[in-house]
């Protein structure tokens, strides 16, 4: 049986890469329905937090809890509940859009109907048999977005999800994230784009130097607030 | 069940990509065939080859062509960081290793199937006189070499100097495989075929395979987690 959870907690997580400290005593809780915006400058540790939550990066110390489960105890079944869209798109350029989605769907035990739905959501049904190598960045990003959401994940991790998308596609992606949160998913978005984050995220977590500087409910005028936080934190 | 299904899916995906690109199979087969041809020009004089040369050349071609293929197999998972997507799949991570390993074994089997008749012809070697024992030697050697190589290729994926490091790490560990393969094959194709000696080398290869397959499956997940 696939374990379910309604919250995810980072408890005093630190992560070192050799002598470099990527995360230092990070604690964070996100609950079903939250859209958490991870904000911060380059190298702040946002992607490492995403990696730890995705079970791809093991913390040097501390614990990650998915509801009552730990990643260590339930690694493989737990991963069926996690969807990740990262900087790189996790697509095979030599394969068609359908072949890519069919492969990843099969890894999650899903059938062709899930693939057709994902292709339709990505607005790529008419390009399903084309190789991904011929797609624009925006088309690849839409496909990767739907690939990440194939298993209907409880925990949705998005690292710069709007890269390469035009205004219309950004609107669709944002609506999709709101739908997921409303349906009970925990959505965590790492982004630099404060304009896009504004109005989307329900909580703002500012990461600086591997530490969480601010964790608070999202407010209007996020850019001004971010400047104040970054200056004062 | 999910373990083998995942391994099969990875193997099938790699096959689908290879059918389109033919990148690895062309590189590997051309390199192996070119090696054998060059050795034949150097060693075969007036239609006579030095005794045992065919055995050595067969295993040198397999090892070098295999190293080329190993580098390319995981390079494919680096382009778009797809290895991370595979590691995120809800299956034991060792299944990914097994899928890649099976692909590597299949590729080397195709290469060997082309090399054997070529070697038999160019070096007048009786490679098909004892097909069962030769197949066992090749199978044992291929599995052992691929088991170690696949693990190292995966480990080195994020290392910048991986192309240099792979042979440096791989050859010292797989020396027993190469020695067993060469000595076993030489015992079979010599003027007086020595089946007990070949059988002994098959036993050594089998022991190597069991040890390194177990170690690789056991260590793959911790090695692949950042």
Image (cartoon, coloured by chain):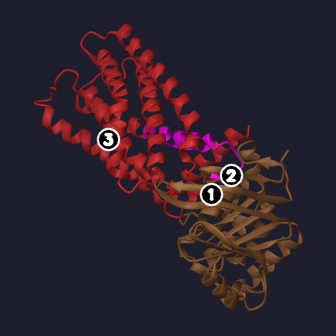
Q: Nearer the viewer, residue B130 or A166?
A: A166
**How many discs appear?**
3
Which residue does the numbered mark 1 point to in the structure image?
Answer: B85
Q: Colour of chain B?
A: red
Q: Is B176 in front, or is A38?
A: A38
Q: Which residue occupies 70% across, 87% down?
A: A225
User: Which quadrant holds residue A91?
Assistant: bottom right
Residue positioned 55% across, 36% down in the render:
B219
- Residue tagged by mark 2? B89
Provide the residue designation for mark 3.
B168
Chain A drawn colour: brown
Circles 1 and 2 on the same chain: yes
Gap in Å between the C-alphas at discs 3 and 1? 29 Å
The chain letter under disc 1 is B
In reply to whether residue B96 is colored magenta, the answer given is yes
Tell me the SS state at disc 1.
helix
Quarter of the C terminus of chain A within the rendering = bottom right
Q: Name the N-terminal-most of marks 3 and 1.
A: 1
Horizontally, residue B152 falls left or right of residue A169, namely left
Residue A191 percent coordinates (x, y): 64, 77
Task: Say if mark 1 contacts mark 2, CB within 8 Å.
Answer: yes
Residue pictured at 78% horizontal, 59% vertical: A8
The foreground one among A5 and B146 is A5
The picture places residue A143, in percent across and down from the top left corner, at 67, 72
Along the viewing direction, whichever of A21 and B61 lies nearer the viewer? A21
- Range covered by the magenta-colored residues: B87-110
Magenta run includes residue B60: no
Kindly tell me whether residue A54 is visible in this rendering.
no
Q: Residues within 10 Å of mark 2 (few under 14, many from 20)?
A: many
Characterize the local packing of mark 3: few (<14), some (14-19) or many (20 or more) Cα atoms within 10 angstroms.
few
Same subunit, labels 3 and 1: the answer reads yes
Q: Residue B203 appears at what percent x and percent y?
A: 45, 15
């Amino acid at each position: 049986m696939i374990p379910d959870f309604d919250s995810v907690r980072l408890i005093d997580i630190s992560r070192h890469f050799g002598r470099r400290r990527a995360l230092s005593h990070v604690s964070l809780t996100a609950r079903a329905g939250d859209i958490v915006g991870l904000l911060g400058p380059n190298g702040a540790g946002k992607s490492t937090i995403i990696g730890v939550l995705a079970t791809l990066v093991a913390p040097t110390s501390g614990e990650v809890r998915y509801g009552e489960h730990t990643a260590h105890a339930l690694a493989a079944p737990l991963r069926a509940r996690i969807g990740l869209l990262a900087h790189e798109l996790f697509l095979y350029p030599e394969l068609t859009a359908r072949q890519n989605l069919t492969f990843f769907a099969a890894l999650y035990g899903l059938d062709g109907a899930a693939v057709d739905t994902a292709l339709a959501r990505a607005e790529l049904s008419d390009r399903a048999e084309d190789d991904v190598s011929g797609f624009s960045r925006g088309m690849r990003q839409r496909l990767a977005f739907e690939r990440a959401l194939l298993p209907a994940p409880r925990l949705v991790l998005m690292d710069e999800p709007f890269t390469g998308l035009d205004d219309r596609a950004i609107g669709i992606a944002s609506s999709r994230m709101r739908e997921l949160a409303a349906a009970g998913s925990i959505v965590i978005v790492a982004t630099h784009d404060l304009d896009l984050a504004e109005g989307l995220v329900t909580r703002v977590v500012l990461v600086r130097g591997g530490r969480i500087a601010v964790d608070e409910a999202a407010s209007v005028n996020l850019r001004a607030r971010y400047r104040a936080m970054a200056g004062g934190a | 069940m999910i373990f083998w299904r995942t391994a099969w899916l990875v193997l099938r995906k790699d096959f689908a990509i290879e059918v389109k690109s033919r990148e690895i199979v062309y590189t590997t087969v051309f390199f192996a065939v070119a090696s054998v041809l060059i050795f034949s020009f150097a060693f075969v004089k007036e239609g006579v080859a030095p005794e045992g040369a065919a055995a050595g050349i067969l295993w040198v071609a397999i090892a070098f062509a295999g190293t080329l293929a190993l580098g390319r197999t995981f390079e494919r998972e680096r382009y778009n960081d797809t290895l991370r997507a595979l590691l995120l799949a809800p299956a034991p991570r060792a299944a990914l290793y097994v899928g890649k390993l099976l692909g590597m074994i299949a590729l080397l089997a195709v290469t060997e199937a082309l090399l054997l008749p070529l070697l038999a012809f160019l070096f007048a070697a009786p490679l098909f006189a004892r097909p069962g024992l030769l197949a066992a030697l090749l199978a044992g050697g291929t599995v052992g070499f691929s088991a170690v190589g696949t693990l190292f290729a995966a480990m080195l994926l994020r290392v910048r100097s991986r192309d240099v490091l792979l042979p440096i790490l791989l050859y010292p560990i797989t020396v027993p495989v190469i020695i067993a393969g060469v000595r076993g094959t030489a015992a079979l194709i010599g003027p007086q075929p020595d089946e007990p000696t070949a059988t002994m080398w098959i036993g050594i290869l089998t022991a190597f395979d069991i040890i390194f397959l177990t170690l690789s499956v056991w260590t793959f997940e911790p090695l692949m987690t950042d």
